[in-house]
Amino acid sequence: MTRVWAPLVLLAAVGFAASPLLSQGFSGFPPDRFPVPQVNPPVQPAGYAFSIWGLIYAWLIAGSGFGLIRRWDDPDWAPMRPWLFASMAVGAVWIPLANLSPVLATVLIFIMLGTALMALFKSGDTDRWWQQAPIAVYAGWLTAASAVSVGLLLGGYGWLSETPAALLALSLGLAGAVATQYFLHRAPSYGITIIWALVGIVVANSDPLNVAVTALAVIGILVILALRGTDTE
């Protein structure tokens, strides 16, 4: 099975990247998909931040291709491959399923996140920029996306108003991100991706200024930066 996973991972990466082209695409949930319409919710980063998906798709394909050609049966690559395959396989069908229901989309994001984090923790120490880094960026953005989804559900279903929903969801997401970065002691691109998302939230909440959400995002950025001192690389 070790030799089977390398081509499967590349196939999943290509299918994942092709999913926006082979479906109707996804540009966020329409406000009216929720009982309480979510118009510019404070939990959501500015639109430009989502451009990181282009980098994620390209890097996952490049890393998977390198792994297939140069590290087909390398034991250092083997442990993370089944988990990465599982995450990207779910990602390949996420868009059409997410367009059916925000709740289903959130459940699937957490499945993608859990398997991506397993892949990240099991990634080896060789070929960092081909093996570890693309998974770290992918897992980092999924961490942010999962928090955004929770915030949208909390606000959209009327369980909390928009700002408290954003504060609770972002606090939970930051707690998970900080714990992940601390216990990894490596993969700085994971933390950098979290910072990218948090900067997007600061920008989105700057006009009009949402002091509470902006302050939480800034605190999160500072904590992630401080954790760099605990990394081993």
Image: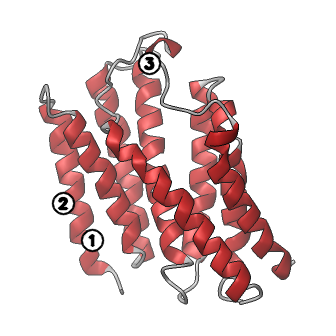
**Residue 117 seen by the camera:** no
Labels 3 and 2: the sequence-earlier one: 3
- Compare marks 2 and 1 and give the one earlier in the sequence: 2
Which picture quadrant has residue 95? top right
Percent from the top left, x then y, of residue 59? 53, 66
Q: Answer above or below: position of 104 versus 52.
A: above
Crowd around label 3: few <14 · some 14–19 · many ≥20 (10 Å): many
Q: x, y percentage for residue 80? A: 66, 73
Decide which of 188, 49 is in the foreground and name it: 49
Q: Give the alpha-carbon distance from disc 3 to disc 2, as whole Å.
A: 29 Å
Residue annotated with mark 2: 222
Q: In which quarter of the image is residue 109?
A: top right
Label 3: state its secondary structure: helix
Q: Residue 227 carries which label?
A: 1
The residue lying at 66 percent from left, 49 percent from top is 18
Residue bearing mark 3 = 156
Observer able to see residue 76? yes
Which residue is drawn at the image coordinates 20% and 44% (left, top)? 216
Q: Residue flagged by tag 1: what amino acid is it? A: Leu
For badge 3, the amino acid type reads: Gly
Chain-order first, disc 3 or disc 1: 3
Where is residue 165? Give x, y as percent: 34, 28
Q: Measuring 63% from the left and 58% from the top, which residue is drawn there? A: 115
Amino acid bearing label 2 = Leu
